[in-house]
Image (cartoon, helix red, strand yellow):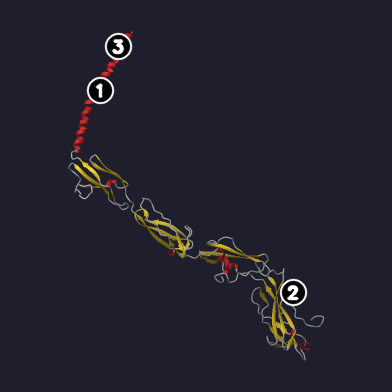
Amino acid sequence: MGNDNKWKNTAAKINGGYKPVTTIKGLTKQSVRQTSGPKNIGLANITLDQNQYTYGEQINPNPTVTFDGNQLTLGTDYEITHQEVIANEKSNPDLAGKVVITIKGINNYNGEAKVYANLNKAQWLPNDKIEPVGSYKQSTNTITVSRNDSFDNQIQRYREITLPNGWEFTVPNYYIAPGNSKIIYKGDDAGFYKNNEFNLNVDVRHQKENINGVTFDPINDYEYTGYEQTPTVNLKYNNKPLTFNQDYTVAYDNNVNAGIANIIITGDKYFNNTKIIPFNITKANNQIYSFFIENNHPVTYARFGQDKVQYQYFKDQEATIPLDNAPSVTGTYYVKATIPGTENYNEVSSNVIEFNYEQDYQEKQQDNSNNLTLILAITIPVSLIVLALIIGLTIYFIKKRKVNKA
């Protein structure tokens, strides 16, 4: 009771906070009884259903109000309003301020009464715009990123989170790479929050597309060379070019010999699975470099397979009358060289050339060889004799000359 002999509904300030008044002390019978007119709600007994709140949560006070032993009815006898009052309570760092709850009399009651509840600081957390809902309560939030997302699109939902005054959203100004990343919400002043920073650990995962859905430019045929054929392949997904060694890797199979070779496309980063792209390695065209007659026989030099050359003989230049076997009788014939095709080379044939076959060619060659031997056998001894005579005469004249001088 104050010096003015009136009871007041107040709150005591204890240890830097406010201790809510939960019950108004009873008054004397003369003071609470009114013979006529509206009754002063300020003389009522008020008990709070909740004497502390956390900043940011819904505040919906529901006190019990009694007057002269009778419980009053909300909406009939009184109305309730409340206001958050932020105060810097240095003695209690967890206290943001107080909640002022006002009870206002209506109808048969007038006046008003104020009671107080503590307003505690909150632990700031992002709201449910982070997906999946509620994942911020865990240590890691998973982001699934599509290859078509820009950096801004990837983090847009994090930017849209409502932040306290003086807080900001920070994240590295570069692409959020797969794996563990961190998004930071930070404020200069904690204000009505216990924390002034919130770190969100982010596990970035790529949304995988099936690499079999890609398209590619046609691949030309390759000719056999004896070396590996490694054609470049240009891939697109949804008509957008893919990047080699980022979106996919490439390997090759059966890509040396002529036949069907394979390009093996394996998805990477945004893609999974494997796609096989076949291409053709054609047989190489063989080539006969020279074809001529030497020593009564045809001779062939070719790019490949000259040791496998086959000769076909004809009686006519048009090569319409073939011989069953090589010529054995002296005469004019015609011959064509053919190298059969192989696994990697096509068959190749020469033009038809004239072949003057001599039946006794070998005998003539042998006679010539014998004659040459005979000539050499005669010539060499005679030459030696002549050489010996020349040497003897030379020595004789040298000696004679010396005698004359003496």
Type of the residue with mark 3: Lys
Q: Is residue 168 visible?
A: yes
Left or right of 7? Residue 403 is left
Horizontal and vertical percent position of residue 285: 33, 51
Tag 1 or tag 2, which sits nearer the N-term?
Answer: 2
Disc 1 crowd rating (10 Å Cα; few below 14, some 14-19, many 20+) is few
The local secondary structure at tag 1 comes to: helix
Q: Quick one: which residue is furthest to the right in this view?
A: 3
Tag 3 or tag 2, which sits nearer the N-term?
Answer: 2
Type of the residue with mark 1: Leu
- Taking the spot 22% from the left edge, 45% from the top edge, the residue there is 334
> Where is the N terminus found, in terms of image quarters?
bottom right
Horizontal and vertical percent position of residue 111: 75, 84
Disc 2 crowd rating (10 Å Cα; few below 14, some 14-19, many 20+) is few
Left or right of 166? Residue 222 is left
Query: Marks 2/3: CA distance?
Result: 158 Å
Q: Is residue 251 above or below residue 138?
A: above
Residue that carries the numbered disc 1 in the rendered image: 384
Q: Is residue 245 above or below residue 5?
A: above
Horizontal and vertical percent position of residue 91: 72, 69
Disc 3 crowd rating (10 Å Cα; few below 14, some 14-19, many 20+) is few
Tag 1 or tag 3, which sits nearer the N-term?
Answer: 1
Q: Nearer the viewer, residue 214 or 146?
A: 214
Type of the residue with mark 2: Lys
Residue that carries the numbered disc 3 in the rendered image: 400
Q: Nearer the viewer, residue 384 or 107?
A: 384
- Quadrant in the rendering for residue 128: bottom right
Query: Marks 2/1: CA distance?
Result: 147 Å
Residue that carries the numbered disc 2 in the rendered image: 13
